[in-house]
Image (cartoon, helix red, strand yellow):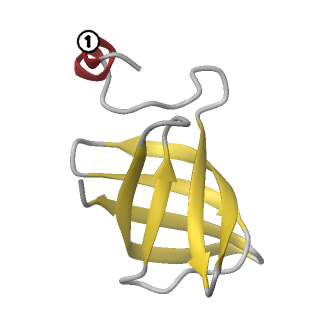
């Protein structure tokens, strides 16, 4: 992603699916979580994903591209349905 691309768009996301790649540190391993973007701003984003709930305050990585990794903090995690979570993230970078 070029600097011009970054200025023209808020952040990277797959334009066809709006899928996000999130990396969650679990001990020595990083778990990959795929979420669907719901909303986005310059300071944060919201997404829906299938999986276990994440603790508020936990830091995770949003893997925007192979070269761009953005640290985020979980601000809210709400259970919408069994194993379906709504996640609000604050962008730390």
Query: In the rendering, at what x and y percent does residue 46 appear?
Result: 44, 54
Quadrant hosting residue 20: top right
Residue position marked by numbered label 1 in the rendering? 4
Q: Relative to 84, is 5 above or below? A: above
The residue sitting at 36% across, 83% down in the picture is 57
Query: In the rendering, at what x and y percent does residue 79 appear?
Result: 61, 77
Position of the N terminus by quadrant: top left
Query: In the rendering, at what x and y percent does residue 32 appear?
Result: 69, 60
5 and 29: which one is in front? 29
The residue sitting at 69% across, 69% down in the picture is 31
Q: Is residue 40 left or right of residue 86?
A: left
Q: Relative to 15, is 29 above or below? A: below
Q: How many marks?
A: 1
26 and 90: which one is in front? 26
The residue sitting at 40% across, 73% down in the picture is 74
**Numbered disc 1: secondary structure:** helix
Q: Relative to 23, is 67 above or below? A: above
């Amino acid at each position: 992603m070029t600097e011009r691309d970054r200025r023209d768009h808020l952040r990277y996301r797959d334009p066809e699916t709006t899928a996000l790649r999130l990396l969650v540190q679990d001990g020595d391993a990083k778990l990959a979580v795929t979420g669907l973007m719901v909303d986005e701003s310059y300071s944060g984003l919201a997404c829906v994903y299938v999986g276990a709930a994440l603790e508020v305050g936990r830091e995770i990585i949003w893997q925007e591209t192979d070269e761009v990794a953005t640290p985020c903090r979980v601000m809210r995690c709400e259970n919408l349905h069994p194993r379906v979570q709504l996640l609000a993230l604050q962008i730390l970078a």
